[in-house]
Image (spheres, rainbow, N blue to C red):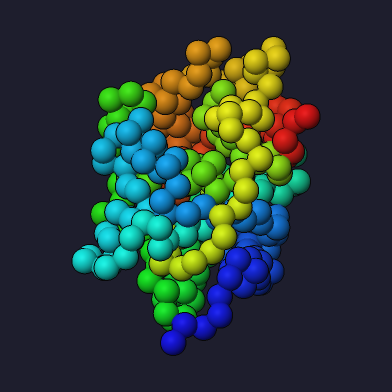
Amino acid sequence: MHDSFGVREIFEEIRSILADPDVNRLGPDCAEPAWDGPLIGVSRGDDPLYAEFQETIGPFHWTPLEALRAGFPGIDVAASDLAVVVWALPQTAATRRDHRACTALPSRRWSLARHYGEAVNDRLRDRLVRVLVDAGYPAVAPVRLPAFGRETSERFGIASRWSERHAAYASALGTFGLSDGLITERGKAVRFGSVVAAIDLPPTPRPYSDRNGYCLHPSGCDACIRRCPTGAISAEGHDKERCFAYIRETTMPFVEDELGLPVASCGFCQTGVPCESRRPR
């Protein structure tokens, strides 16, 4: 017998975890919150966008049904029986302020959020899966599955088996910017999490149809181009290989020296831009 569970209960579950100062913090020695209050969106498992993502990114990219079956092999459900729940975790004003002042190497707060804040995000993923499964709804957090990993897309280069940014786009949380970041109502300085579940939830209406609808670049904005310290963003888009090389060769060694942690920290294109903390009008 399923317990009653809907979008409201899911949102409250996420919010209650983030309200716990022992969980939502920038590190074991830093009691500042890692994240501000969340945004949440829902899409259906049979949304045509997921088939489109697989077609454009590569056959390795999971549809919601494939993701669920990676965790529940042989489960007898249809794509139309599934919901994809996605949340966005905005960076705090203090983290954005510190990072906005940096030009080549990441701020300490940003790196702490990238490491310890993502651990908070993992707790959110695992907790929501556990709550849903305990209520009788098979659920997985795709990026937490053992089969999750990176692949190479013929069209886009470095990719993964499940893109939480694309799931967020499908779930009405925002549209892509020139740098490939997703611009939400709380801006681009966010991290995403997602869960796929065999549960009947209404999809969040998408207020856009244009993949880049919230980006100001067509109107002449080049802020993220100017913010990138390695020239990985241009009018043609985002050079992932160049971006990853800068992180691997420059920012990761710097952060490891500073924090003693190998953190893939960068995010300059997410701060000091008009879409940092809001959807630009």
Give the x, y percent position of residue 30. 65, 60
Give the x, y percent position of residue 31. 68, 63
Residue 44, compared with residue 167, is above or below; it is below
- Tell me what residue is drawn at x 32 percent, y 65 percent: 77
Residue 233, compared with residue 113, is above or below; it is above
Q: Nearer the viewer, residue 181 or 49?
A: 49
Q: Quadrant of the C terminus?
A: top right
Q: Quadrant of the N terminus?
A: bottom left
* Whether residue 235 can be seen here: yes
Give the x, y percent position of residue 277. 73, 39
- Most extreme residue toward the left is 74
Quadrant location of residue 81?
Answer: bottom left
Residue 207, compared with residue 9, is above or below; it is above
- Most extreme residue toward the right is 281
Q: Nearer the viewer, residue 215 or 42?
A: 42
Quadrant location of residue 246?
Answer: top left
Residue 278, compared with residue 241, is above or below; it is below
- Tell me what residue is drawn at x 45 percent, y 37 percent: 252
- Tell me what residue is drawn at x 26 percent, y 68 percent: 75
* Whether residue 150 can be seen here: no
Residue 156 as seen in the image, left or right of residue 19? left
Residue 225 as seen in the image, left or right of residue 273? left
